[in-house]
Image: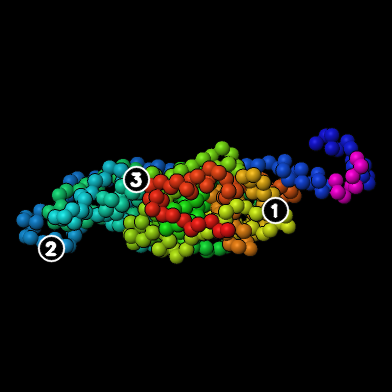
Amino acid sequence: MQDLKRTVRPDRVGDVPFATSLLAIIAVLSLMAPVTGQSPTPPPSERVPVSIDSGERGIDGALAGDPDPHEASVVFSEIISVGDAPWLQLSLSGTRLAERSPTNHGAFLRLTAMQDGAVQFLNATSLAQWNGRSAFFNGSDVLVELFVYPDSGTSRVRIDEVKAGLAAEGGLASICGSTDERELSDDPRDARASNGCTAFLIGEACMLSAGHCSAASSVEFNVPLSNPGGNWNFAHPNNQYAIDPQSKLTFNQGCSNEGMSFGVFPNSNTGLTPRQAQGDGYVLASSAPSAAGSPTVRIRGYGTTTSTNLPNSWNSVQKEHTGPLTESFGTTVRYQVDTTGGNSGSAVILESTGEVIGIHTCGGCGSSFGSNLGTAIQHPTLQSLLANPAGVCIEDVPPAPAN
């Protein structure tokens, strides 16, 4: 940059008119703006040890006077309380539930948040799908109930710790200008991942996100506003889905060279897939368009607000903003659209068609110049992931790219 400064004269730069050269310098500065990965911003939490053990519990039909085999009974209940925690997730890895068989109906858990009455049901299959964890519950108290059917053998509830929420913290901002201009949105196709990233639905249960978001274990749709202090509120367990670990396919070699495809199991309460519940999914473009003419793009996602001018209650809930596509070359798309930490994994949507042209991954906008960026939809590795799905995504073929 020192050489550029030495060539500046009042009316010209070298042999190029000054106004033209100034535009060129601004373009260079835009490309040289600090680029930072918009890392996921999971809600702050701590692991709290608890000691819950139901022992072996069951119902012997003969001893119980031949109860109705189609009617389950509560054989254990306990309320888990953690101070004034804004939310809880239970660790159930030590829990064993009798499985359903041709001769009995097994056992199941009913978990109820005392704050809002949200309920999650888990049987042996869905407990395994959730990898021995519960959904996220709002509030500091969760009622745990074990239901068993007669002659189903014994089951046991063991809980050694819970993950408890702490006060919200700020996140990395990449606002293109001095003011965060994002607005609230409620598109049913976009989900918040458990680690704070954004993911978007492209099939029956298959989704896309950023490569550095691979630590996510679940996603939730229809996320409510956060508390006034910025602490997350979670969607009802009917809207939370466990990620199938076998379905995760990722690559992560930098801001415009990363992506992740994955699928989720049907909801443990409703049995519905996300598309059945949400009603729609995104259509992928075959490639990102040229940036000539600065076409408008839209980004929706679950970015933080605790470091911007927006209300704390908008923190990590769905918001959107539009702006110009400024660069489109190779596997990179750049745009001047407001984002913050937590927007990683958002769909980059071409406004004129509604098609996805990329996955947002990194921030680079500043108060006066720069642009945010992502991986273009035509990236060869991303296309390979889409063509070779795994896990629950194998039978979940997304719509064909638009022509």
Left or right of 256? Residue 106 is left
Q: CA distance from mark 1 to mark 3?
A: 44 Å
Q: Secondary structure at mark 1?
A: loop
Between marks 1 and 3 in the image, the one whose residue lies nearer the viewer: 1
Name the one closer to the observer, 67 or 270: 270
Instruction: Give me the disc on residue 291.
Output: 1
> In terms of sequence position, does the residue under pointer 1 or pointer 3 come before the other?
3
Quarter holding the N terminus is top right
Which residue is tagged 2?
A: 68
Q: From the viewer's perspective, is 1 left or right of 361?
A: right
Residue that carries the numbered disc 3 in the rendered image: 131
First in sequence: mark 3 or mark 2?
2
Task: Residue 89: tell me if it is visible.
Answer: no
Q: Quadrant of residue 146?
A: bottom left
Instruction: Look at 57% across and 54% down and name the residue there.
Output: 286
Q: Position of residue 177 (x, y in %)?
A: 71, 53
> In this picture, which residue range is highlighted in magenta?
14-21
Which amino acid is tagged 3? Answer: Asn
Q: Which residue is found at the position 60% from the left and 63% from the top?
A: 353
What's the residue at 38%, 47% (across, down)?
A: 391
The residue nearer to you, when weighing 82 against 305, is: 305
